[in-house]
Image: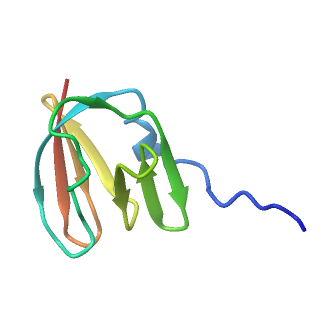
Amino acid sequence: MATVEAHQEVPTSMGLLLGKRLIYQKHKPGKCLSVERLPREAFQIESIRQFGSRIIINDGMLVLESIPTVTERKGRIALLLPTGEELYFYVD
């Protein structure tokens, strides 16, 4: 039986997060975004994987249902999802 690698390349905008140390700031909730597993202290983005339209950060610490728009300004990073949900971090 052939083995197929399920994940795709990391979207360019998400790749900008690799290696950054972030601190959770706030989020605009929705049905597809759960922040329960996010640490409240600083953490480093060590891995980002894409499975179909889902984005898996740090082996499941954060799962996004679709590829977000990533913006960085004044020491903050915003992940804006097509579903209207938003997630904000401070850059440590």
* Vertical placement of residue 85 versus 19, above or below: below
- Residue 29: x and y in percent read 13, 66
Q: Nearer the viewer, residue 19 or 14?
A: 19
Q: Split into 4 quadrants, where in the image is the C terminus?
A: top left
Q: Residue at x 41, y 45 (%)?
A: 14
Give left or right: position of 21 versus 50. left
- Image quadrant where one finds the N terminus: bottom right
Question: Is 46 left or right of 32, judged from the image as shown?
Answer: right
- Please identify the residue farthest to the bottom as the structure is shown: 31
Q: Residue at x 23, y 62 (%)?
A: 34
Structure colour scheme? rainbow
What is the quadrant of residue 51 in the picture?
A: bottom right
Q: Residue furthest right?
A: 1
> Depth check: 65 or 72 in front?
65
Query: Left of 22 or right of it: where is 68?
Result: right
Figure label count: 0
Q: Position of residue 50 (x, y in %)?
A: 52, 56
Q: Name the residue at 37% across, 36% down.
A: 17
Residue most toward the top? 92
In this picture, is 63 found above or below 70? below
Q: Position of residue 81 (x, y in %)?
A: 28, 63
Quadrant in the picture for residue 67: bottom left
